[in-house]
Amino acid sequence: MPAVVVVGTQWGDEGKGKATDHLGSDVDIVVKFNGGNNAGHTVVVDGEKYALHLLPAGILSKGVTPIIGNGVVIDLEVLFEEIDALEARGMDTSALRISADAHIIPSYNRLLDRTSEKFLGKRQLGTTGRGIGPTYADKMNRIGIRVQDLFDESILRQKVEGALLNKNHLFTKVFNKPKVDVDEVTRELLSYADRVKPMVVDGSLLANNALDEGKTVLFEAGQATMLDIDHGTYPFVTSSNPTAGGACTGSGVGPTRIDAVVGVSKAYTTRVGEGPFPTELFGAEGDELRERGGEFGVTTGRPRRCGWFDAVVSRYASRINGLTDLVVTKLDVLTGYQQIPVCVAYEVDGQRVDEMPLDQTAFHHAKPIYEMLPGWSEDITGVRSFDDLPEAARRYIERLEELSKCRVSVIGVGPGRDEVIVRHQFDL
Ligand code: GDP
Ligand code: IMO
Ligand code: MG
């Protein structure tokens, strides 16, 4: 099974980093295909915690070539900060490769992201403020700056000038900010060129050649299905396609080459930022789940909104991504609840709805219909085989599987690389 896509099935932070890392030892290439340093993927190896933002989780596994694909947007300052921090901890990052077609997040787009959020006031989206939205907008508007532009100073200056034509009007006349200087931005970007150059490749060629040679390529998503620009809870989404289709456009590998699509899901649900979230828990109940799960953002440190497992979302993610397998993480966090509610459908304006409502207004009004499942009290963090789980925990997983219409192949029972139960081995 040489080409495997790993995606989030909820609103992010499902444990994609850990899932990718878990598969890492059997993989030759890990391509990150979307997003940028809005992502925060935590991987715990031998008790050491690594927080990755821009780098693919494959960077932590020996013998893996990590590629930042063309679908990613790169903040060069953050890239090198992350590389230097890993090197300082004794990790070898020399295998990292970057697609020549990936777009760069210039400093003015960080400014634009933060300023436009402020101007939106009550309507703000709660973005990470990393310049993600404006950089994808520039890509679509065809005024983006790509990695390959760093190697031709005159082209780079022209492109920066072009991008700033409209933006400087916006900064000075609407946002009351100083004009952004073309030379300064160009100089700043050029300062990274020599360091970036040896890493730059045709990412599509590298990944396809590897597949031709029978090697295994893993495609790692940032964000998640419900944050997808097309299929998520628009406008409370990110600006890329974190769903399985994005793995193809964001890497230059065709859909006929993909063998498996693995969805990562928490055993409950979390969300950061604004937007609808039907199973959200408030007050003491929400605080309890947040404390148990340590649900604070890796990127912004914001407390994550917490709620019960939503099987409508999970079924939707199975369909949108064509999932072949589910990885359910953080089952250990639910230990100690007497009963665990699982949302099986919604009630919208007095009607039962079993699938994702057609329009956003209905989703905003959706009230969860819960089924109560029995909990368990035994510590499960040391369990490594499905049969050794308490009966209620097995039933919980089997019910999630039934409701999600996708088999659960791996279960997370702790943050560590090996704290997993493998039910169905991926045939890598
Ligand atoms: P990602 O963005 O999808 O990679 O997920 P994050 O790293 O942002 O958030 C997932 C958090 O859950 C991290 O702190 C992980 O270390 C942690 N984690 C992952 N799997 C498990 C698990 O099975 N049990 C527990 N207790 N923690 C887990
Ligand atoms: P990982 O990869 C959770 C959310 C932000 C905000 C919305 C738009 O760690 O799962 P953006 O800065 O992308 O324009 O913000 O998307 N968001 C995430 N939430 N996990 C992430 O990444 C996220 N990346 C973006 O909080 O609501
Ligand atoms: Mg995260």
Image (cartoon, grey):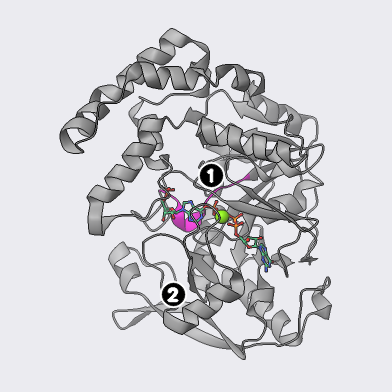
- Looking at the image, residue 383 sits to the left or right of residue 195; the answer is right
Dot 2: within a 10 Å radius of its alpha carbon, few (fewer than 14), some, or many (20 or more) residues? Answer: some
- For the point 55% across and 60% down, which residue is it? 9
Callout 2, which amino acid?
Glu
Residue position marked by numbered label 1 in the rendering: 245
Residue 103 position, x and y percent, is: 48, 29
Question: Picture coordinates of residue 125 (x, y %)?
Answer: 34, 54
Do we see residue 369 in this rendering? no
Residue depicted at 44% across the width and 69% down the height: 355
* Residue segment shown in magenta: 220-229
Mark 2 vs mark 1: give the one in front.
2
- Image point (58%, 47%), residue name: 221
Up/down of 80 relative to 362, above or below: above
Residue at the (56%, 55%) spot, across then down: 298
The quarter of the picture where residue 92 lies is top right
Is 264 magenta? The answer is: no
Q: Main secondary structure of the magenta part?
A: loop
Q: Position of residue 282 (x, y in %)?
A: 42, 79
> From the viewer's perspective, is residue 334 above or below residue 195?
below
Q: Is mark 1 within 8 Å of ligand 2?
A: no
User: Which residue carries the number 2 mark?
Assistant: 280
246 vs 10: above or below: above
Confirm whether residue 352 shows in the render: yes
Kindly state the secondary structure of the residue where label 1 is placed: helix
Judging depth in this view, the residue of 179 and 5 nearest the camera is: 179
Location of residue 401 in the rendering, given as x and y in whole percent from the top left corner = 64, 72
| Lateral position of residue 420 relative to residue 326, left or right | right
Residue 295 sits in which quadrant?
A: bottom right
